[in-house]
Amino acid sequence: MKPIPAHKFNLSTAAKIAARAELSETTEPMVLTLPYLLPGLNGDNGLIRMHWAKRKELSDYVEFDIQRQAKGKFVSPVWVAYYRYYSGRAMDWDNAAASFKLVGDAIVSEIGRAHV
């Protein structure tokens, strides 16, 4: 959880933090599965070289998949364990970590949608 600046911390903030911690301890783990591999940073189809419109399309697809599975059940803060399975050659660790970018953005978007 992000530290809260002292000037913004008050009793209602403390109550919200306590409620979140209590809720997160009692909430069942949620497993989200994406049945496809997301691109890493490098390579011909990597996120760095991908056209912005194609990246947006892929981002929207991942976000839709996360929304469909989560159904507004995210509670902030969220703990994420990201497992990436391969059928061929595995990526190095920094490319595998970069492939989480689209999933992380979709989770943040879904949390914002659930608390509006």
Image (cartoon, rainbow, N blue to C red):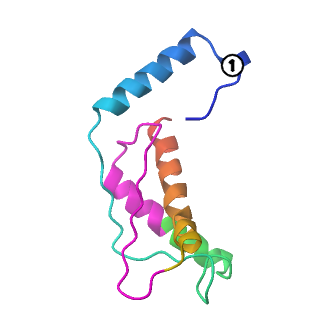
Horizontally, residue 31 falls left or right of residue 8, namely: left
Magenta segment main secondary structure: loop
| Residue at the far top in the pictured view | 11
Above or below, 73 against 89 in this view is above
- How dense is the environment of label 1, judged by Cα within 10 Å: few (below 14), some, or many (20 and up)? few
- Queried whether the magenta region covers residue 62, the answer comes back as yes
Could you tell me residue 34's position as x and y percent? 36, 68
Question: Which residue carries the number 1 mark?
Answer: 8
Q: Which of 92 and 42 lies nearest the eye of the viewer? A: 92
Q: Is residue 110 magenta?
A: no
- Judge whether 78 appears above or below 96 on screen: above
Q: Residue at 46% of width from left, 68% of height from top?
A: 61
SS for tag 1? helix
Q: Report x, y in % for residue 63.
A: 47, 60
Q: Is residue 92 above or below residue 69?
A: below
Q: Position of residue 14 (x, y in %)?
A: 53, 16
Say which residue appears at 54% left-offset and 66% top-offset: 97
Q: Which residue does the image show at 42% across and 61% down from the upper left?
A: 64
Farthest residue toward the right?
A: 7
Q: Residue furthest front?
A: 92
Q: Position of residue 3 (x, y in %)?
A: 63, 30
Q: Amino acid at mark 1?
A: Lys
Q: For the point 35% across and 42% down, which residue is it?
A: 73
Res 22 → quadrant: top left
Quarter location, residue 68:
bottom left
Q: Which residues are magenta?
A: 61-90
If the image is split into quadrants, where does the N terminus sit?
A: top right
- The tally of labels here is 1
